[in-house]
Image: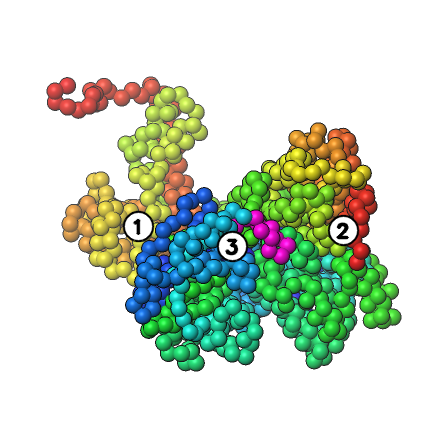
């Protein structure tokens, strides 16, 4: 539950579909290229000054994945005709690329008409604590970040309509329409850059939208049933999807993100806050590649839910990996850190009962796994003793600590135990 | 107020969260204060909640609506909102209107726009805590819900006595860990708040730091924040402008985010950076530059707290560090399964209510006993007299009616008198003798809603329902029921105002003009006269449940038992043979002519 970005194609579709009868609707023209489908043929696009695309018009082809600075990275192409746009996309389609630290496959593309224009406007809507804010600039485009002074900041109290006097008359209806959608559709962020006004009409050329996923339940008729994309490079594995499904069905919280299956430190940490502290502690001490996953469970999940959750993590932990076998003596051991603070209401014995059930199922495969536990809260003595005894029985090396030891001390113990090289800080 | 809560703070809890409510009361007991929870709101069930204070069991009142709870406890100014994420918003907005001073919302996953609307509505009126949090605690004074966890951890974290630290953080789950850490390296917290992990929490870090700064009992602040949002800019500003002068220890978690090979949404909805300024690194640097004490890692926090405590501490440290003896609460308290509020047989002198049975015996009359055991009250003489008249009126109505007939058949079958009585009583229901309460309900409702008698008759006709208490098999307006006449005569003679009775008689006028047997019958007469005579004399809480408890049908059953037993004894004395219904009196088959 948080704000999540949509694909550009989804953002445009949302604006296009939900505009309704409001005046000032910008022209929104695109076809989207989705994975495993043939390239679509674009319809006849309208151009300013009575032109038509494809007759003699140029096209814009764009990668539609969730990363920015596409123009600067070479992922936007102005093509002289459709054939060239198609060829460009065919060349990039299914290609694996690295954007910053993120590696991912290019699957989504857009094809749009090239709209000749002189001026680019910038519009965005952001929710701040006590007001909504409209940002507007007559100097939009790819260098908007450098336009500090030219960007107007129009604050709109939550129970009032915006005052758009300072915005060029011909764009006022369009900006008001965008702002209305921003409010009505539970969006956390909406950005149009550029918005173009040419020959008496406005054209929406690029859109970024972040939706508040907590509101999905009441946006069922708009975006609530859409598949909200993962970030770029986040192609989830089966176990992640299973846990996500589990999470969606429980009133508690069960989160799991695989970061690096070759990592030797696996975690299932209780609590939204504590799980961040544990991830910090690990990446602070060793190379971040050693951290196999981010995981979080909280809100007193049932024994069965904990068993399912743990089983999926153990399954991934014990799966054979593609690629070269790990080198070096220390590499053969893996650590599972079951961490957390002092719970307010999560029952430690009840949740650990589920962990133990899952461990018993995977016991035979866990011969190279050490378990490090730090957890406290209601019923903690019973839960910790149960887990320790179960691991002893199964012959899995395990240490269990309660509230008497600092919360992240087990991270250091695990790193030492696995003999992982410390990071030079 | 320098603290969110005091030892006098009381709260209304929305949602019947038994375990959390018990934890709040356990905290109160350990902190040696009076119970802080005064009422629960449960829209689906109004029965009181059984709770313990220490080892003593007591009942907490439960209301169906928040407004009712607040008007019954007007001095209570804290609302702990356990409503689900979809209804939490309505509860908060109503709570603001009802002028609660503090509203803590526990639900996770409330849409951001909703919370932002709460924030603007609550401005300068209500302090919001949450959503997506466990709450807050003022040490030794008051805890919200599960804050501080189970009883053993509560005392280990010194939450039952005030220390010297003001703590505010985002994470609810981590707050308990931090209270423990602070307790182990200083005298503990004065107050702790977990504002919640959402992007727009109802109150923010600085709101609470401002209060801490004004509180002389707090010598330094501890802040634990997270990646995402820019609230730390306000703290940095306050430090630079010297609005915060006390030492402030701060840590922003989430430094790992930049190392991840892909987007990771942490478990908290607000824990993501929209831009560089929202990253943990940037915010730690910002705070450090502004003069906050920022460690290099989370792990160095304890030492920093200890160092700051030693520096700011006074000679009273030792006194503060001393552990107070805390009351013991056994782990397994078991709620009793039964409750009794009308009599007590445990003493030397058994009691009806608070009066000895002997005194009732000496008084020598049965109706005062009924008033005590049924309604926990005493009644005026003329009302007792009227009730007795009703018992006389309903005691028997010949052998042919359902109750008597059934009892007679059972008696002739050789059943003992109690079995035979039961078989007779079991016929009492909607068609026989059991319409008294229904009549009271429908006439009571019509009068309360101000329906004219004609409108009431039309309403019932439209619904296709008979009016309970109207109509008789044999008696008509021309041959009135003498029982009704006698009862009405006494009522009219002794009471000046009989609004329900007058109303029912107006209804009777309308119904009898259509059909002469649609008269106000015995059931109806008892119902409307008792609404006028008995109901006003009953205690308030008994009045509230008067229509749903079934007292009036009970009165009929009690009176009729006399007659039924009479018929049973009669048959026994006559040594009557087993009753068999004559076959010629039975229509066999489907009733078609061709059969």
Residue A400 seen in the current view: no
**Residue A231 shown left or right of residue A158 in the figure:** right
Q: Position of residue B26 (x, y in %)?
A: 68, 53
Residue at position x 70%, y 44% in the image: A263
Residue B101, given in percent of the width and then of the height, sits at 57, 69
Q: Using the image, name the chain to which the residue with label 3 belongs.
A: A
The numbered disc on residue B509 is none
- The quarter of the picture where the N terminus of chain B appears is bottom right
Give the secondary structure at mark 1.
helix
Name the residue rendered at 76%, 60% in the picture. Answer: B297
Q: Which residue is mark 2?
A: A286
Q: Position of residue A218 (x, y in %)?
A: 43, 55
- Number of marks drawn: 3
A371 or A10: nearer the viewer: A10
Please check whether the numbered discs 2 and 1 fall on a single chain: no
Q: Quadrant of the C terminus of chain B?
A: top left
Vertical side of A159 occupied by B374: above or below? above
Q: Is residue B180 magenta?
A: no
Considering only vertical position in the picture, is A174 above or below B348? below
Q: Horizontally, is B106 left or right of B258 in the view?
A: left
The residue range painted magenta reads A96-106
Hey, which quadrant is residue B303 in on the image?
A: bottom right
Please, which chain is the residue tagged with disc 2 on? A
Q: Residue at x 48, y 75 (%)?
A: A139
The residue that label 3 is drawn on is A65
Q: Does residue A138 appear in this view? A: yes
Label 2 to label 1, Cα distance in Å? Answer: 87 Å
Residue A3: x and y, percent?
53, 58
| Pick the front one: A65 or A213 | A65
Q: Are marks 2 and 1 in contact (CB under 8 Å)?
A: no
Label 2 vs label 3, nearer the camera: 3
* Residue to which mark 1 is pinned: B525
């Amino acid at each position: 539950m948080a704000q999540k970005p949509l694909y550009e194609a989804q953002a445009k579709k949302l604006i296009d579909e939900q505009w309704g009868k409001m005046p000032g609707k910008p022209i929104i023209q695109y076809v989207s290229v989705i994975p495993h489908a043939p390239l679509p043929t674009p319809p006849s696009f309208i151009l300013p000054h009575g032109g038509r695309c494809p007759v003699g018009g140029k096209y814009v082809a764009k990668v539609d994945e969730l990363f920015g600075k596409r123009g600067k990275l070479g992922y936007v192409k102005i093509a002289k005709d459709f054939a060239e746009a198609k060829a460009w996309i065919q060349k990039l389609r299914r290609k694996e690329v690295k954007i910053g630290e993120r590696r991912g496959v290019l699957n989504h593309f857009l094809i749009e008409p090239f709209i000749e224009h002189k001026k680019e406007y910038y519009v965005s809507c952001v929710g701040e604590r006590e007001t909504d804010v409209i940002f507007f600039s007559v100097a939009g485009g790819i260098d908007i970040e450098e336009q500090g002074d030219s960007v107007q900041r129009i604050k709109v109290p939550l129970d009032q309509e915006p005052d758009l006097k300072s915005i060029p008359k011909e764009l006022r209806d369009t900006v008001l329409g965008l702002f209305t959608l921003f409010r009505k559709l539970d969006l956390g962020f909406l950005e149009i850059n550029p918005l173009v006004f040419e020959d008496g009409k406005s054209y929406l050329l690029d859109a970024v939208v972040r939706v508040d996923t907590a509101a999905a339940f009441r946006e069922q008729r708009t975006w609530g049933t859409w598949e909200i994309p993962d970030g770029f490079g986040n192609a989830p594995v089966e176990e992640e999807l299973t846990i996500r499904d589990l999470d969606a069905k429980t009133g508690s919280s069960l989160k799991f993100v695989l970061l690096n299956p070759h990592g030797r430190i696996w975690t299932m940490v209780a609590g939204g806050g504590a799980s961040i502290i544990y991830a910090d502690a690990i990446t602070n001490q060793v190379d971040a590649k050693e951290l196999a996953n981010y995981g979080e469970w909280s809100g007193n999940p049932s024994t069965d839910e904990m068993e399912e959750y743990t089983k999926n993590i153990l399954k991934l932990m014990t799966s054979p990996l593609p690629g070269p076998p790990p080198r070096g003596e220390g590499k053969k051991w893996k650590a599972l850190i079951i961490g957390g603070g002092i719970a307010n209401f999560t029952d430690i014995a009840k949740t650990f009962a589920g962990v133990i059930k899952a461990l018993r199922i995977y016991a035979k495969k866990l011969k190279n796994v050490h378990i490090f536990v730090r957890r406290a809260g209601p019923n903690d003595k019973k839960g910790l003793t149960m887990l320790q005894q179960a691991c002893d029985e199964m012959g899995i090396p395990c240490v269990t600590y309660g509230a008497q030891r600092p919360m992240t001390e087990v991270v250091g113990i695990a790193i030492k135990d696995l003999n992982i090289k410390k990071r030079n800080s | 107020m320098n603290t969110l809560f005091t030892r006098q703070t009381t709260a209304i809890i929305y949602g019947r969260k038994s375990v959390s409510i018990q934890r709040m009361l356990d905290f109160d007991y350990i902190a040696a204060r009076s119970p802080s929870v005064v009422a629960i709101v449960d829209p689906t069930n109004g029965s009181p909640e059984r709770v313990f204070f220490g080892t003593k069991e007591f009942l907490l009142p439960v209301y169906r609506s928040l407004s009712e709870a607040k008007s019954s406890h007007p001095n209570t100014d804290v609302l702990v909102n356990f409503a689900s994420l979809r209804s939490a918003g309505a509860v908060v907005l109503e709570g603001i209107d009802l002028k609660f001073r503090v509203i803590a919302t526990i639900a996770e996953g409330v849409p951001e726009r909703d919370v932002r609307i709460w924030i603007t509505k609550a401005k300068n009126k209500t302090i919001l805590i949450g959503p997506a949090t466990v709450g807050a605690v003022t040490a030794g004074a008051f805890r919200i819900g599960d804050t501080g966890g189970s009883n053993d951890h509560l005392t280990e974290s010194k939450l039952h006595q005030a220390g010297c630290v003001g703590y505010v953080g985002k994470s609810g789950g981590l707050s308990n860990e931090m209270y423990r850490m602070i307790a182990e390296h200083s005298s503990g917290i004065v107050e702790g708040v977990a504002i919640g992990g959402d992007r727009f929490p109802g109150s923010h870090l600085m709101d609470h730091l401002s209060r801490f700064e004004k509180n002389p009992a707090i010598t330094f602040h501890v802040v634990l924040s997270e990646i995402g949002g820019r609230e730390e800019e306000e703290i940095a500003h306050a430090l630079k402008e010297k609005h915060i002068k006390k030492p402030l220890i701060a840590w922003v978690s989430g430094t790992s985010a930049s190392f991840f090979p892909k987007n990771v949404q942490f478990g908290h909805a607000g824990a993501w950076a929209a831009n560089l300024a929202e990253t943990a690194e940037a915010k730690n640097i910002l705070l450090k530059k502004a003069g906050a004490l920022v460690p290099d890692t989370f792990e160095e926090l304890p030492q920093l707290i200890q160092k700051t405590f030693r520096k700011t501490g006074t000679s009273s440290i030792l006194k503060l560090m001393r552990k107070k003896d805390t009351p013991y609460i056994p782990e397994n308290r078991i709620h009793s399964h039964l409750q009794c509020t009308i009599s007590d047989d445990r003493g030397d002198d058994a009691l009806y209510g608070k009066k000895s049975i002997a005194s009732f015996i000496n008084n020598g009359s049965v109706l005062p006993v009924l008033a005590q055991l049924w309604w926990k009250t005493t009644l005026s003489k003329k009302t007792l007299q009227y009730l007795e008249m009703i018992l006389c009126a309903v005691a028997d109505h010949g052998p042919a009616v359902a109750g008597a007939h059934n009892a007679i058949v059972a008696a002739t079958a050789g059943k003992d008198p109690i079995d035979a009585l039961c078989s007779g009583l079991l016929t009492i229901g909607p068609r026989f003798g059991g319409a008294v309460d229904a009549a009271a309900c429908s006439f009571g409702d019509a009068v309360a809603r101000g329906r004219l008698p004609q409108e009431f008759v039309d309403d019932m006709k439209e619904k296709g329902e008979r009016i309970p208490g109207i109509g008789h098999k044999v008696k008509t307006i021309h041959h009135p029921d003498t029982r009704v006449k006698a009862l009405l005569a006494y009522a009219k003679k002794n009471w000046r105002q009989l609004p329900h009775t007058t109303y029912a008689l107006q209804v009777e006028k309308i119904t009898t003009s259509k059909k002469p047997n649609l008269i106000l019958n015995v059931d109806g007469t008892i119902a409307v006269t008792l609404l006028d005579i008995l109901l006003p004399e009953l205690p308030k809480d008994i009045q509230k449940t008067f229509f749903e408890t079934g007292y009036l049908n009970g009165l009929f059953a009690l009176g009729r038992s006399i007659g039924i037993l009479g018929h049973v004894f009669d048959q026994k004395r006559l040594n009557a043979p087993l009753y068999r219904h004559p076959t010629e009196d039975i229509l066999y088959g489907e009733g078609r002519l061709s059969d």
